[in-house]
Image (cartoon, rainbow, N blue to C red):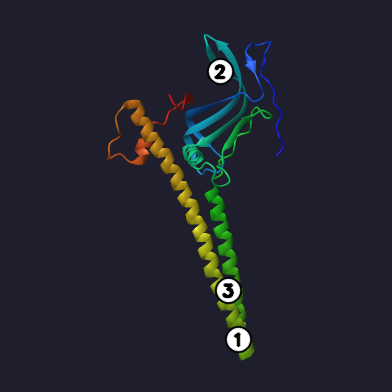
Amino acid sequence: MSRRTTQDPHVDQERGGEIHPAFGVAVVTRRHGTGRSLFQSDLLHNETISLTVHEATRRRDLNHDWVSPGRDLVEIEMSLAQWGSLVSSVGLGSGVPVTIRRSEHDRSVPEIPYQPRTAESLREVREVTERMYARVKAATTVLHEAIHEKKGVKATKGALSALENAVAHAGSSAQFTVDSLVEAGEQVVAQARADIEASVLETVRLTGTAPSVEASPVDALALTAPTTSRERPAGA
């Protein structure tokens, strides 16, 4: 790893204050609004977490450093489940999927169409099922011909063995695709649970009253579903 050069901060002649390429400010914002499509999430989210990194300027006044954000460098948006995974998985895995909203090079990143990945899992299950059915059907046809055309014991045994192999392969393939589909479903449930729990906590914070134990999670979520988009710092 090469050693980086060191550079002193310098004063911005136009805006005043000290600037440096390494000075930055990170702002976490909690967003509310209509359902938003996010990368690697099968839900439309009314509540999300936005993380924006800005350039920073430092001013010295009244014996205190005053740091203010400047031009934004990148903005990413996450579901509440993705945010929870990010802050709880430091140094683990290959990272958490996020949605890039703005960057230094692309000031307005196009929106992601709502295309749930569970639909892809269902498509794969259909394709595997069709292939298994075609293989078993073909092996059954060969066995039927061997029997009715009296092709002999060897041909009949070979056709029967091929059919048994096709059935055995179908079982293992079906188990794998079903397990994959179940895993995808569990991920969707986890995403929904995280969003619902966060919405309930937000309701408690705003009203000081916990939702009734008789209220369903969907009712709790509806309590905080706003009609217009607005932003508020996450720690507010």
Say whether disc 3 or disc 2 marks the residue closer to the N-terminus: 2
Q: CA distance from mark 1 to mark 2?
A: 83 Å
Label 2: element kind: strand
Q: Nearer the viewer, residue 193 or 13?
A: 13
Q: Which residue is mark 2?
A: 67
Label 3: element kind: helix
At which x and y percent is residue 215? 30, 39
Say whether disc 1 or disc 3 marks the residue closer to the N-terminus: 1
At which x and y percent is residue 129? 55, 64
Determine which of the numbered discs, if any, sits on residue 156 in the image.
1
At which x and y percent is residue 166? 58, 74
What amino acid type is highlighted by mark number 1?
Thr
Q: Nearer the viewer, residue 49 or 16?
A: 16
Residue at image position (40%, 39%) is: 196
Q: Quadrant of residue 225?
A: top left
What amino acid type is highlighted by mark number 2?
Val
Residue at image position (57%, 51%) is: 120
Q: Which residue is mark 3?
A: 166
Q: Is residue 153 above or below residue 172?
A: below
Q: How many marks?
A: 3
Between marks 1 and 3 in the image, the one whose residue lies nearer the viewer = 3
Q: Nearer the viewer, residue 133 or 15?
A: 15
Q: Which residue appears farthest toward the top when viewing the image? A: 62
Say whether disc 1 or disc 2 marks the residue closer to the N-terminus: 2
Q: Are marks 1 and 2 in contact (CB under 8 Å)?
A: no
Determine which of the numbered discs, if any, sits on residue 213 in the image.
none
What amino acid type is highlighted by mark number 3?
Ala
Label 1: element kind: helix
